Image: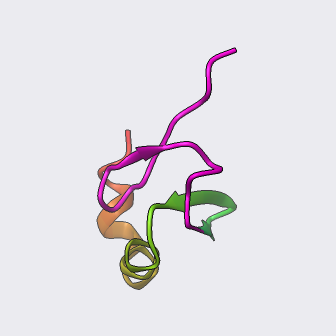
C-alpha cells in the first residue's frame, strides 16, 4: 500500500501526516506543516497560501 504524501502549503515540502511537525485547522480543513515557522506564517495570513493550493 502506498503512503499518501501531503504538501506543506507554505514551503511546499512533501511529507506524510506522521512526518508533519505541526497542523492547523482553517475553514474546517486540516493543514499540515513541516515546522512551527510554516504553521505560524500560515496562521498570520492563510489567504496568501490557500490561493496557491490546487
* Residue 15 in the image, given as x and y percentages of width and height: 48, 44
Magenta segment's dominant SS is: loop
Left or right? Give the position of 10 relative to 15: left
Q: Relative to residue 36, is residue 53 depicted above or below?
A: above
Residue at the extreme front of the image, as rendered: 19
Magenta region includes residue 11: yes
Left or right? Give the position of 21 relative to 44: right
Give the residue drawn at x 46%, y 78%. 36
Q: Relative to residue 30, is residue 26 depicted above or below?
A: below
* Residue 40 in the image, given as x and y percentages of width and height: 43, 82
Magenta region includes residue 17: yes
Left or right? Give the position of 48 relative to 35: left
Give the residue drawn at x 35%, y 49%. 13
Give the residue drawn at x 55%, y 58%. 20
* Residue 4 in the image, given as x and y percentages of width and height: 59, 30
Which residues lie in the magenta part? 1-22
* Residue 27 in the image, given as x and y percentages of width and height: 62, 65
Q: Relative to residue 40, is residue 19 depicted above or below?
A: above
Q: Which sits in the foreground, 49 or 22?
A: 22
Q: How many marks?
A: 0
Q: Relative to residue 45, is residue 51 depicted above or below?
A: above
Give the residue drawn at x 38%, y 38%. 54
Amino acid at each position: 500500500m502506498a503512503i499518501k504524501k501531503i504538501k506543506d502549503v507554505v514551503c511546499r515540502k512533501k511529507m506524510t501526516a506522521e512526518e508533519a511537525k505541526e497542523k492547523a485547522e482553517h475553514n474546517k480543513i486540516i493543514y499540515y506543516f513541516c515546522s512551527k515557522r510554516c504553521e505560524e506564517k500560515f496562521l498570520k495570513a492563510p489567504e496568501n497560501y490557500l490561493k496557491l493550493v490546487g
